[in-house]
Amino acid sequence: MVKLSTKQEIKEALDMPFSEFKETIMAEAIKVRKEATDNSLYTTAMLGYTNHCKNQCLYCGMRAGNTKLPRYRIPPCDIISSAQNAKDMGLERMFLIAGEDRGYKFDDLLGAIKEITKMGLQVSLAGGEFTDSQYTELEDAGVYEYVLKFEMSHEDTFNRLNPSTNYKQRMAAIEKIKSTKMLLASGNIVDYPGQTQEELIDDIMLMKQLDISWAPVIPYMPAAGTPLAEEGGRGNLETSFRQISIIRNLLPKARYTAQHPGEDPKLGVSAEDGNLGALNAGADTLFVDLLPAAQAQNFSVIDNRIVLGLDHAKKMASLAGMNINVKAIK
């Protein structure tokens, strides 16, 4: 049985030769996943409903300062139509994701969510920081899970890289979400320029402390024209795989994103080698992008944000020896 309860034990796991890590920590993560999730590959519809954002995060391609990015907002009727398409594919979960767009009418978003839940779809939502009362309204509208990443667990680093908000405000929003009946999905960015091992370990410990339902984490991927992209390139894939295995052992029933890049950056986060590497580390979640191709390229949190369809998820499940799972999570 792998023991990873302290910062020192996590440090030793991160420092372990990768061949030894795969035979111990990673092997245990696969065993834990099989027992906790029936070895499911959770496949969820995803729709980036607006790429407007008021924030100036130093690492995001959709930051307000990116004036070259064509912006869009998908009206509620089209969000609902996309949900119907997802249902027609047999998918029972939908992830609505957006920039922090305060120009998108909140009542319109609530209305779309209510209609989607009436269809029987389970809704996860990521729309940034809302007010306390708005989180309550989202809960009442039927949101099952709210996704708000803490990004970095060290306050000074967070405040430097996220100048439009601050760490205390972000954590207060996270605590408000936890006070509702909505599940909390949260996590970090792995191996961004300047991240120390101590920061990474504290990120892992914070995910454990928050008892997250899902860790939507991938290695840092530079977005062209952002300030952080000038400081360094893509995060280390091996480090990201190590984090997945470690957290899987710490939080067996949580979900972990398998949408990872591989050796060829042009393939984005749907590279088969990256996805399979993450699945073999203990990940269990892939997405089916509902955006039309013309808009998908403009939901550019990262460069080459390529998310493929249901056939890709089925192939990855087969290669990883997992069971495809499109049902609502009980």
Image: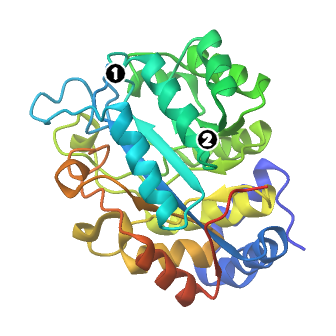
Pointer 2 residue: 117
Relative image position of residue 210 (x, y in whole percent):
75, 37
Relative image position of residue 116 (x, y in whole percent):
54, 41
Residue sitting at the far left = 68
- Would residue 151 be visible to someone looking at this image? no
- Would residue 16 be visible to someone looking at this image? yes
Cβ atoms under marks 2 and 1 closer than 8 Å: no
Judge from the rendering whether residue 260 lies leftward or rightward of residue 62; answer left or right. Answer: right
* Picture residue at 73% right of the left edge, 55% below the top: 254
Residue sitting at the far right = 1
Q: Where is 21 relative to 48, above or below?
A: below
- The image quarter containing residue 68 is top left
- The image quarter containing residue 252 is bottom right
Q: Looking at this view, is 3 or 182 the one in front?
A: 182
Judge from the rendering whether residue 52 lies leftward or rightward of residue 282; answer left or right. Answer: left
Give me the disc on residue 55. 1
Q: Where is 67 relative to 192, above or below?
A: above
Q: Around disc 1, counting alpha carbons within 10 Å, would you say few (fewer than 14), some (14 to 19), or many (20 or more)?
A: some
Measure the C-alpha gap from mark 2 to mark 1: 29 Å
Q: Amino acid at mark 2?
A: Thr
Q: Around disc 2, counting alpha carbons within 10 Å, would you say few (fewer than 14), some (14 to 19), or many (20 or more)?
A: some
Number of numbered discs present? 2
Judge from the rendering whether residue 66 lies leftward or rightward of residue 149; answer left or right. Answer: left
Relative image position of residue 12 (x, y in whole percent):
72, 62
Secondary structure under badge 2? helix
